[in-house]
Amino acid sequence: MSASKKTEVWKELLETLSTHIKAPIICGPAVFGKLPFFQELRNRLHEQPYTNVPGIRYVSVDIEGTPVHAGPFKTNEPHALDEELSDARVKLPEWQPQYEELITLSIKQAHHAGTKLAIASESLARAKLLLEFSQSVSHARTLEQALTLAAQFIVSKFKLSNALLTANGKTARYYDLVPCALLAEQKIIAQLKESNSPIIVQNSHTDIFFSSIKDIKNAPPCMLGLPINRAREHIGHAVLYAEHIPHIENITEVLFELALELERLNEYEKAQENATTDSLTGLHNRYELAAKANAMLQRLSSSNQPISIIMIDADNFKKYNDTHGHVEGDNILKLIAHIVKQSTPENAFACRYGGEEFTIVLPGAEQNAAKDFAEKLRTDVEQSCQLTISIGICTCMNSTASLQTLLKEADAQLYRAKHLGKNRTAGSVMIDKNLGVINI
């Protein structure tokens, strides 16, 4: 049955037509208007009760393979009906010549209007579903958050028992599975990756695909594997669990919207990374330095812990750049940045300060520890690079000095290291922001 025949406009138009022609409209089991006794008799006596016979007329219209009948009507022509049908025929409405065109046109218009309404209703329902989904994941700021919120939405909205969502290397699960279900899930995922087509398991307990899995009867009965695609590229998959197979079309609509949301988040994360990362070296930039270092200073000063700021400059970089060209100069900076990144502890922070200068913030590091770190870094660069580096260090023993003060003093120590002959380390220490600076 077409979607139009399930709409209220279809029903209302056929009821109105039936009232106008004083005869019923029959569409399969549905009857609009009152079925006359004559037709009830024909329905019992004839295999094709809506066929024209002398004295009786129907109008039949094919709607997407389903015949819609209007009638019966009585005509003035002689008939050969039996006595019972003949008596019942008397009460039928008179056939009018204009009925043929009127009924045919009215039924086709009702179908057209019903179809349009059905399409509009489906579009509205789909729009509401996608709006509800978008609202549920709108506050996600990472791919992991979006997948977690999407899994919660899909399970709740479609009355599932569990869900696994994987995309762009990230995964979210509604809740944990028993071991046998995990094994079944692995089989579904392997097939999904190979075929990139939906996989429907009506009953996992009896499906031969899972016959080798022990205790499979403890797994959810229905399983559904769906690919997540974006621009024809397979970016992930969903494995869903339920007591009964849900409406797949609506779920695929949600997964398509999820793929769009993940793409937006991916672009957002890239933009965030570009805003805080130096494009040449991959280190943080100086704008990120302020936020990170100030947070460290606030935390460390509250417990009187030390902090060390290290300033690094590539020796003779301008001369090397002028002699070998900017491409080779960039390669030198990338190599130094790589060594800096590899040397920096996880709790510390390294950035490209600008040009050929780099900065490292070492939280909790006293002056001796900072100098040992700097000397090892200087030696590593000397052994691996065509250029050497000079390093300036400033340590505040209780982290009460401002970032600007520490950077200024570390830069002064860097200048001192350059003045002393380059390829060396110079440092100073501050006991407190209110006390003087001591060169080491």
Image (cartoon, grey):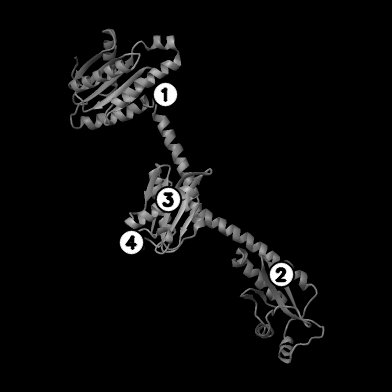
Return the residue at label 3: 189
Mark 4 surroundings: few (<14), some (14-19) or many (≥20) residues within 10 A: few
Residue at (51, 55) in percent of width and height: 128
Q: Earlier in the sequence, mark 2 or mark 4?
A: 2
Q: How far apart in space, not on screen, are marks 1 and 2 (Cα)?
A: 73 Å
311 vs 355, left or right, is left
Return the residue at label 2: 61
Residue 95 sits in quarter:
bottom right
Question: Given this view, does label 4 or label 3 mark the residue nearer the observer?
Answer: 4
Q: How far apart in space, not on screen, are marks 2 and 4 (Cα)?
A: 56 Å
Q: Secondary structure at mark 4?
A: loop
Q: Earlier in the sequence, mark 2 or mark 3?
A: 2
**Residue type, numbered disc 2:** Val
Q: Position of residue 57 (x, y in %)?
A: 76, 78
Q: Nearer the viewer, residue 271 or 371?
A: 371
Q: How far apart in space, not on screen, are marks 4 and 3 (Cα)?
A: 20 Å
Q: How far apart in space, not on screen, are marks 1 and 4 (Cα)?
A: 55 Å
Return the residue at label 1: 280
**Residue type, numbered disc 1:** Leu
